[in-house]
Amino acid sequence: MSGQRVVAWSNPWFRWSVISFCASSVAAILIGFIWLPSAQGDFSAQGLWASICRAAGVPARWSEAPQATASGARSTSVVLNEAMAKRGSDVAVGRGATLA
Amino acid sequence: MFVAKRLVLAHFWVAFVAFAVAVLLGEWQMFIRSPLHTWIDNPELYYRSVTAHGTVMGYVFPTLIAMGFGYAITELALKRPLLGLRWAWGGFWMVMAGTVMASTPVALGRASVLYTFYPPLIADAFYYLGIVLVVVGSWVWVALMVINLRAWKKDNPGATVPLVMFGNVASAYLWAWTSIGAAVEIIFLILPVALGFKDTIDAGLSRVFFSWTLHAIVYFWLMPTYIVFYTLVPRAIGGRLYSDTMGRVAFVLFLVFSMPIGIHHLFADPQVGSGFKFMHAVFTAMVSVPTFLTVFTIVASAEIAARLRGGKGLLGWVRALPWDNPMMLAVTFSFVMLGFGGAGGLINMSYQMNETIHNTQWVTGHFHLIFGGAIVIMYFMLAYELWPQLTGCAPLPQKLVRAQLWLWFIGMMVLAMPWHLVGLMGMPRRMAYYDYTHPAIHPQAWTVIASTVGGLALVVSALLSVFVLARGRKRNEAPEPFTFSVAVHMPARVPAALNGFGLWVALMIALTIVNYGFPIVQLAMLEGTSVPVIHVGAPR
C-alpha cells in the first residue's frame, strides 16, 4: 500500500474526488434551481430569488391574484380528528347506504 | 474458518427459511388476486401478507445474509478468528427477537402498513420496535466489521486490505448511514404516535426520512452480490479478476452515491421542491457508473476464463465459457435481470418518465427483477460456495443447483415481465383485487395469471434451494481451503485512498447534507403540517 496521506491536496484521489463532488453538486444545483425553473413561466414570474425558493419547495403564493380567503373568511372550520377515521357501526353504515 | 462457522450457519439458516416462507406468501398474494381465484373476502388479509412478505424480504433476509457473509469473509479473508464473537451472537439474537416482535402484530392483523410504513397509517408499536431491534442487531455487525478491520490493519501495518474485506466493510458503512433515515423516522415521528403520546404525524417529513433509507437499502442488498461478482465469480469459473482496482472504485462509488438519492421515490410528493427532486435524479444516474464498471470488469474476467480454456475470436470465446458451472449460469442470469431491471430503473429515476409508471405494477416488476432476480440469485451462490466450509459437506449436487437456478431465472422473468407490461398499461400496484369483468381491465387479466405461474416456479425453486442446503451431508475429509479470486495483475501498491474509507465516508456524509439537509430542516420547521393518524387493525 502507498504510504501517501489521503487527506492532502497533493493526493490525486483526494483532489479529484473533492473537485468532482463540488463540480457535480454545483452543476446540479444550477440546473435544478436556476436553469430549469427559468423555463417555467409560473416559477420565474416573480424573479430569480422567488424562482429558487419555489424550486426548493418553500411555500409561496403562486399568483398575485387576490386569494379567496384574503378577506379573512375561512374556507372551512371543520377539524379532523382521529376518531373520524374509524369505521362506523354496521347499522350506521346500513342507514347511510339506504339514504344514499 | 476459525470460530464463526456456527454463527454464519445460524444467520444463513434463519435467512433462507424466512425467505422460503416469504416466497410462499408472495405466491399466495399473486394467486388470490388473479382471475384463478374469486375476490378475497377480506382485503386486509392481502395487505397483511404484503407487509409480512416485504418485511422479511426487505429487512430480515438480506440483513441476515449480509451479516452472515460478512462474518465469514472476516475469517476467510483476514485468516484469523473473528473478534467479538459474543457480540455477534448478541446481534443475531437481537435480529431474531426483532423478527418475532415485528411479525407477531403483522400476523394478528395489527400492522398491515407494508414494509414502507406509509404514515399516517400507524401499526401496533411492537411492529416498529421489532424493526428497530433488527436494525440495532445489524449495527452490532457494522461495528464488528469496522473493529475487525482496524485490528487487522494494526497488526499488518501498510498491508493491502483484501478486496473482499474492503467490499464487506464498505457495505457495513453504507448500511450504518443508510439505516439512520428509517431509524429517525420510527423513533422520533412514528413511535410517539404508535405509543399513544400523539395522534397526528408529519407524513411528509416521515416520507422524506424513509426515502433516506428506501433507495440506499437496495445497495445494501446489492453489496453481497457485487462482492460475489468480484471475489468469487472469476475464481469459480476458472479465470482471474480483470482488475482489483476497479472493484475498489466500484465499492467506494456505491458508498458515496447510493445514499443521497432517495427523493426520486417522492417525485409525486408535493412537500419536496422540484429542484431537490432534480438533484436526486442526477445522483441516481451516477449510481449506474459503478454498475457499468462492474459489468465491464466481470465480463472481462469471464473472457479471461474463456481464453484460458482455449476460447478464440472476437466473440467466439463465449462458447468456451464453462456453461455447466452453476456460478457461470448464475452470473449470466443475474446480469440479464440486472440489465432489464437497470434499464427500467433509468425510467424510474427520470423526473419526467417516472410520471408514466408511478405507482403502477411496473415498479413492482422493477424491484423484483433487481432484488429478487439479480441479487438473490447470487445469494444462493454465496451460500452454495460457503456451505462445504460451514458444514464440512461435499460440494453440493451440481445438477440440482443448476435446476434451481434455471427455475429461479425463468420464474422471475415470467413473474416480472408481465408486471412491466401491465404497468405501462396503467395497472396500479398494491391492489387486493381487480375487477376483470370491466372491459378496460379484462385484457390485462392474462398478465396476472402469467405472473402467478412465474411465482409458482419461484416457490419450487426457493424450496429446492432449502432442500439442496439441507441435503449437504458431512463427510470425513476436511473441506478444501477457501480462496477468493486473484487479479490478473495485482497492483504493486494500492492507493491509500482505496485501502481505507475516511475520504469516501466524508463524501457520503457531505453529499447527504447537500441533497437532504435543506428539505429535512425546512419540513421540520414548517408548522401545521401534521395530519391525524389512522391506526391499522385497532379495535373499532
Image (cartoon, coloured by chain):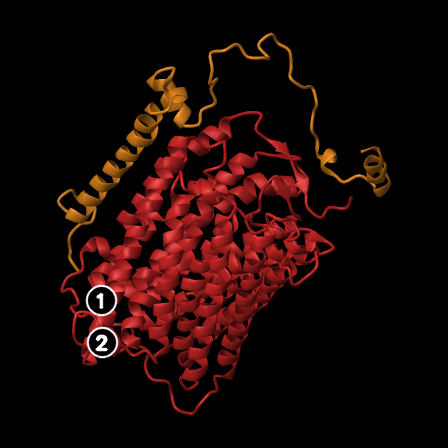
Chain colours: A orange, B red
Q: Distance of mark 2 from mark 1, alpha carbons?
A: 10 Å
- Please state which of residues B235 and B24 is positioned toward the viewer in this rendering: B24
Residue B306's tag is 2
Q: Amino acid at mark 2?
A: Ala
Residue B466 placed where, x, y %? 52, 76
How packed mark 1 is, by other alpha carbons closer than 10 Å (few <14, some 14-19, many 20 or more), is some
On the rendered structure, is B490 left or right of B212? left
- Please state which of residues A5 and B355 is positioned toward the viewer in this rendering: B355
Q: Earlier in the sequence, mark 2 or mark 1?
A: 1
Task: Identify which residue is drawn at 18% across, 80% down.
Answer: B310
Give the residue at mark 1: B300
Residue B289's tag is none
Whether residue B459 is visible, yes or no, is: yes
Element on which disc 2 rests: helix
Q: Amino acid at mark 1?
A: Ala
Q: Residue furthest top?
A: A71
Q: In the picture, residue B515 is in which quadrant? A: top left
Q: In the picture, residue B450 is in which quadrant? A: bottom right
Q: Chain of mark 2?
A: B
Seen in the picture, residue B147 relative to A82 is either above or below; the reply is: below
